[in-house]
Image (spheres, rainbow, N blue to C red):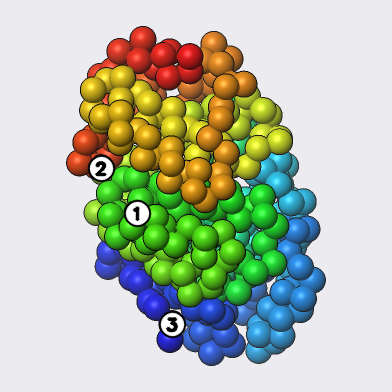
Amino acid sequence: MAKIIKVGKKNSQYEVVIARNAVTKTRLSKHLKSKNKILVITDSGIPSKYIRELKNLLSFNKQLYFHEIPCGEKSKSFSTFIKIQEKLADLKFDRSDSMIAFGGGVVGDMTGFCAATYLRGIDFIQIPTTLLAQVDSSVGGKTAINIKQGKNLVGAFNNPSLVLISSKFLETLPEIEYKSGLGEVIKYAFIGNKKLYKLIHENSKKIKSRNLNILENIIEESILTKSKIVTQDEKENGIRAILNFGHTFGHAIEASNNYKGITHGAAVTLGMIIAAKISYFEGHIKIHQLDNIINLIDSLGLESNYEKYKFKDLKKFLSNDKKVSSGKLNLVLINSKGAAFKTNQFNNKSLEKSFS
């Protein structure tokens, strides 16, 4: 039985469908039968059998095109953006046509941004194939590309018309990408979803072994948390900022590595520990609560050691963070009740101590 979650308000509302196999001809045809042309954006890491399956499911459309981008964060660039825009123009796409993001977070971000900007906006569907994209980037309408000064600094808010989440894609996901997704899953447990926290705590072995029933439950809980927040605050003017728990430092770690050698989820996991330590040094949580956070991360086999990253090396990247406002860095911290909050009121010594 598929689980359906509605996200957004009024005209921008869309459905997120979660199932073992959510990508069916019936669902695709319902949303795309009126479209003249469809461009599917995918990447070189998607197994060819999944490409063949999707082509077959979309065979009702006679003007179906695929565009493959290189796998990895480097594809979130202006050069990739321009190539896709030019392809849309060459194929004479108009506002009656649609795009599909078929891949991980990079594919989703790139497709969403291209859809937001081509002809000032055309429809697109998200079919996320990685755990990270399924629980996070495919939902909420954030789209962006990277520039040398930092991650996701150029983008737009653009909701998809539909999100189809098939847990079966996780069976063939490389372990490094699977763990990257778990980093985003655990974030929702830390920012207030107590049911998800308990689910992870009691099922860490099943999660590590990719039990699909458990995975569908944690995907659902993750999206329920995110959908509630982004529906209240679609363009991050308030509460949505708490979804960035761990991301300020995570993005800085990614940038300091030139987006190589560490996944987004792994960087965010380290960022959450740093933010939790600042929360402790600022007196918002007790030492046992900090220990519980690190222990839950360790229980999923995620990396928690960030000693090779120094504050002095990350500082320049922190200054370019999107959450800098009026020259002040805003951090997302957590309190003793397990609730996340945004603040620019913290002692810089607490920040520096978290790296010592």
Bin the neighbour count of mark 1 within 10 Å (Cα to Cα): few under 14, some 14-19, many 20 and up.
Answer: many
Residue at 65 percent of width and 69 percent of height: 171
Between the residue at mark 1 and the residue at mark 3, the CA separation in whole angstroms equals: 23 Å
The amino acid type found where label 2 is placed reads Gly
Query: Which mark lies nearer to you, 1 or 3?
Result: 1
Q: Earlier in the sequence, mark 2 or mark 3?
A: 3
Q: Is residue 178 left or right of residue 206?
A: right
Bin the neighbour count of mark 3 within 10 Å (Cα to Cα): few under 14, some 14-19, many 20 and up.
Answer: some
Q: Secondary structure at mark 3?
A: loop
Q: Earlier in the sequence, mark 1 or mark 3?
A: 3
Q: Quadrant of the N terminus?
A: bottom left
The amino acid type found where label 3 is placed reads Ala
Q: Residue 338, which numbered label?
A: 2
Bin the neighbour count of mark 2 within 10 Å (Cα to Cα): few under 14, some 14-19, many 20 and up.
Answer: some
- In which image quadrant can residue 291 be found? top left
Residue 76: x %, y % from top left: 65, 44
Which residue position is annotated with label 3?
Answer: 2
Which residue position is annotated with label 1?
Answer: 197
Q: Residue 256, which numbered label?
A: none
Q: Is residue 176 left or right of residue 116?
A: right
The amino acid type found where label 1 is placed reads Tyr
Q: Nearer the viewer, residue 16 or 290?
A: 290
Q: Earlier in the sequence, mark 1 or mark 2?
A: 1
Q: Is residue 331 left or right of residue 112?
A: left
Query: Which mark lies nearer to you, 2 or 3?
Result: 2
* Above or below for 143 versus 152: below
